[in-house]
Image: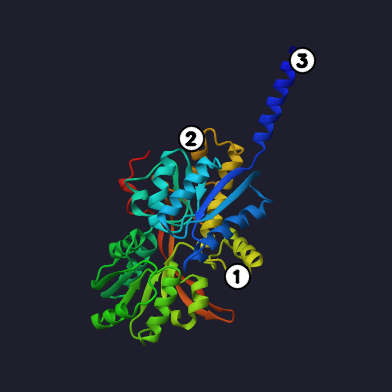
Amino acid sequence: MKRYLSAFVAILLLSGQALAGEPVKIGMITTLSTKAGYLGEDIRDGFQLAINQEGGTLGGVAVELLVEDDSAKPEKGKQIAERFAVKDGVKIMTGIVFSNVAMAVVPKVVRDGTIYLSANAGPSKLAGSLCHPNYFSVAYQNDNLDEVVGRYVSDAGYKNVYLLAPNYPAGKDHLAGFKRFYQGELAGEVYTRLDQSDYAAEIASLRAAGPDAVFFFLPGGMGINFLKQYAQAGLQDSIPLFGPAFSFDERILAAVGEAALGVKNGSQWSHDLDNPANRQFVEAYRQAYGRTPTLYASQGYDTARLLASALKTTGGELGDLEAFRKELQRADFESVRGNFRFGNNQHPVQDFYIREVIKTADGYTNKTLQKVFTDHVDAYAGECTMK
């Protein structure tokens, strides 16, 4: 009997060792289809680069990245999250591009005990009233990249600006961020259909309004179409355009070309930021994928590096979520942005810049012009009661 009991215990120990050796599963819900599909591709590719650089591990812990396309649909995002949690036993999720998908997915998964690390979407409610110990933004709060442009446009002397954004949570957050630091008048404030492709009516309206500048937030394919149509309407040289980095990433610029030349945009990152982590990342990304990384790729990479720092110190043990969260809160990694730390709402406290679209021998890209904010805290941190 003792012999059988000893054999049974040995089997249990071996099973425990096998389980302990299983990779940590990371569920990535992101947008890989629709006109905005490349945004999710870049987040995925940046994240995967960090894994590849460690030979399939993060922080020395084996990981398995599960990637699913949400098609920018909130209901589909919810279904994927439930499948990851129930079927695959995923305890760490990331990757959502759009804020309406994030609002449908994140509040429930974090309540259910899953860690969510945002590599892009940063809706105001998740930074404020719906902040949660299991939710970390490794990107920004939606308003941030617009706040820096609002400050810059005011300092540059523009006094009558026309605003344009899609009618969904991020669109409203982005215009709210611009208005928070812009001191002039508004020539108009227009919200377009999400995934709209024809902006003829909006361009006619803004021309009639006679603004001295236009600020717009139209990510992905929306931005490509708007920039081309704006230039075709002959407004590029008469009414300056401003916006957040999302409408001026390198993949948009490759499609738009000269129509974006000279446009100034706000960002917390650029490929020309001069720090060791960023130089290494940009070179490695170009070598791996044959293209210059976008903001989305940089955020995917930083999200993976943050996760690596916590996995390393905890040995990949997720049974004690409080201990794991503390390691995430420390943000003990070298960010491609340089300065990076978490505020009380677990959103980044970081620097923000103005960039300008320029033309080089290799095509169109962004050049950092100046730092506008240092250690900037988002506007909703005070609404977060989490300690």
Circles 1 and 3: CB distance less than 8 Å? no
Q: Position of residue 234 (x, y in %)?
A: 36, 87
- The residue sitting at 56% across, 42% down in the picture is 88
Instruction: Examine the rendering and report whether any part of residue 302 can be seen.
Output: yes
For residue 322, the mark is: 2
Q: Of the residues under marks 2 and 1, which one precedes in the sequence?
A: 1
Dots 2, 1 in contact, CB < 8 A:
no
- Picture quadrant of residue 362: bottom right
User: Disc 3 and disc 2: Cα gap in Å?
Assistant: 40 Å
Outermost residue toward the right in this view: 3
Q: Earlier in the sequence, mark 1 or mark 3?
A: 3
Disc number for residue 291: 1
Helix, strand or loop status at disc 3? helix
Location of the C terminus by quadrant is top left
In the image, taking residue 190 as reference, residue 241 lies left or right, namely right
Decide which of tag 3 and tag 2 comes sooner along the chain.
3
Category of crowding for the residue at label 3, using alpha-carbon neighbours closer than 10 angstroms: few (below 14), some (14–19), many (at least 20): few
Q: Position of residue 368 (x, y in %)?
A: 48, 70
Closer to the camera in the image, 230 or 285: 230
Residue located at (33% from left, 41% from top): 385
Report the residue at 47% width, 57% height from top. Answer: 70
**Residue under numbered circle 3:** 3
At label 1, which amino acid type do we have? Arg
Residue 20, given in percent of the width and then of the height, sits at 65, 35
Residue 99: x and y in percent read 39, 56
Specify the amino acid type for callout 3.
Answer: Arg
> Secondary structure beneath disc 2?
helix
Q: Quarter of the image for the N terminus: give it.
A: top right
Label 1, label 3: how far apart the Cα atoms are: 62 Å
Point out the residue furthest to the bottom here: 234
Residue farthest toward the top in the current orientation of the protein: 1
